[in-house]
Image (spheres, coloured by chain):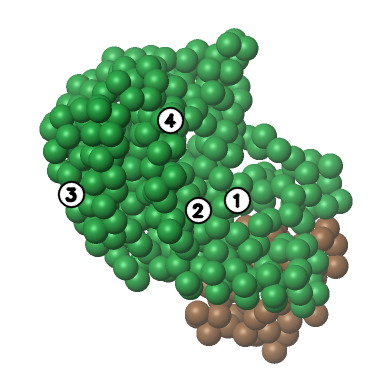
Chain colours: A brown, B green
Amino acid sequence: MKKFIAEMPSYTYAVKGEKLLKSRGFDCKIVRSEKNCGYSLLINTSELNATKAFNILEKNAVPYERGTDS
Amino acid sequence: MIINFDNSATTFPKPLTVRKAVYRAVETLGGNAGRGGHQLAMRSSSAVYSARETVAEFFGAEPENVIFTLNCTHALNMAIQGVMKNGGHLIISGIEHNSSARPAVTLASEKKIRLSIADVYPDSSKTVESFRRLITKDTKAVVCTIAGNVTGQIMPYREIARLCRDNNICFIADGAQACGVLDINIINDGINILCTAGHKGLYGITGTGLLVTDGKFRISPIIQGGTGTMSESLKQPELLPESLESGTLNTVGAVSVKAGIEFVKSKGVSNIFSHEDRICKRFIREIQKDDRIVVYRHPQAEYVPIVAFNMRNVSPEKLSSYLSEKGYCLRAGFHCSALAHIQLGTKNGCVRFSPSVFSREEDAVRLAEVIRKFSVQIRN
């Protein structure tokens, strides 16, 4: 398991993304971003599933930027 | 005793669930929504998002396309000025509220846009035709109320929306008198931008309004500033809802609108319409027992639950003032709608009766008796 970060453009999209992922069984939460007063989604998952999670965000038109994973 | 029949201005009383939600919000939502990551801020942010979801679901939109505004006027100004920023041709209906008419006329008088006003008829097909005739190659937007705020006349908004869609024109609908009594869904109805009040038929508190968009037409912000996002940049964010929500949000108001919509859903929009419509029809029957009463309704047109009327040779303000002394609150005058009164030919305005879901038929009957007594009194 690793922590993946999707930096969101706003709190609104952060919640939308969180709800989408949680409804599909992903372990994720909203955290404050390190930069730009934004909010990020912290996704706790495997490498393979992280790709799936990011695809879900894209398919649902949730804009994000891939952050530095830890 | 105070009986409110001026619910078109703002509904009163508010449902108990709304009052309780407001109290809880004031008590617990002390953070600034979308600003910061501490517990209080996140709690407020979550409450605002939840309200956004409720509004979005109610009107068939996405949560990020729900913009909280101060009132319907604010939303209409944002929509009209935001869509028409780079000029073009705008059409508004001949019964628009001043909240649409004034920004449109101002833009036109400053030569920033070209403005046309479409005539409105009791016959819907004639109204649609009057819009169709005005469309030109540079028509960018049409603003039309779903239901007029003076007589309550329901406009052929779905047909006008279709006309706009076929000509790639942005359709801006004013839902102030319709939302909560008519089932409005922006996708099914073809509305690109719906502007409405939160404090009328949606039973939220005053100081609340909504702009709900399908996102197809860009709305340039008329106010810029802090959005809680991209704070390092001096450029206004492009994404909704933040691009149109500069400044601290009315969290308590948003919570009240959510509670109000949940109340409306629990009652059922069509049930609310039927209840209020029945009261209006009874009121009309009762006041028309006096031959001096003129009711501004046409058999060919349909109406939301509003009754505009006058007593011949009596000023509307005089009648309203008398009714107020007797405990009945009805609004007289021009109802912030110069165009609608020109269309009606009511040079001194009129009196408007507008019930809510809490109104009682027996109160409307008693009010009619008071009006008839007043008529006799001033006749003698």
The chain under label 1 reads: B
Query: Residue at label 3?
Result: B282
**Left-right relation of B227 to B21:** right
Look at discs 3 and 4 and give the one toward the viewer.
Answer: 4
Task: First in sequence, mark 1 or 2: give its number.
Answer: 2
Residue B306 position, x and y percent, is 30, 42
**Nearer-the-camera pick, B88 or B23:** B23
**Nearer-the-camera pick, A13 or B71:** B71
The residue under the point 38% across, 42% down is B323
Secondary structure type for disc 3: helix
Residue B355 position, x and y percent, is 33, 51
The chain under label 2 reads: B
Q: Which quadrant holds residue B21?
A: bottom right
The residues bearing labels 2 and 4 have C-alpha atoms spaced at a distance of 25 Å
What type is the residue that disc 1 sits on?
A: Gly
In this rendering, the answer to whether A31 lies above or below B97 is below
Q: Are marks 2 and 3 in contact (CB under 8 Å)?
A: no
Secondary structure type for disc 4: helix
In this rendering, the answer to whether B116 lies above or below A17 is above
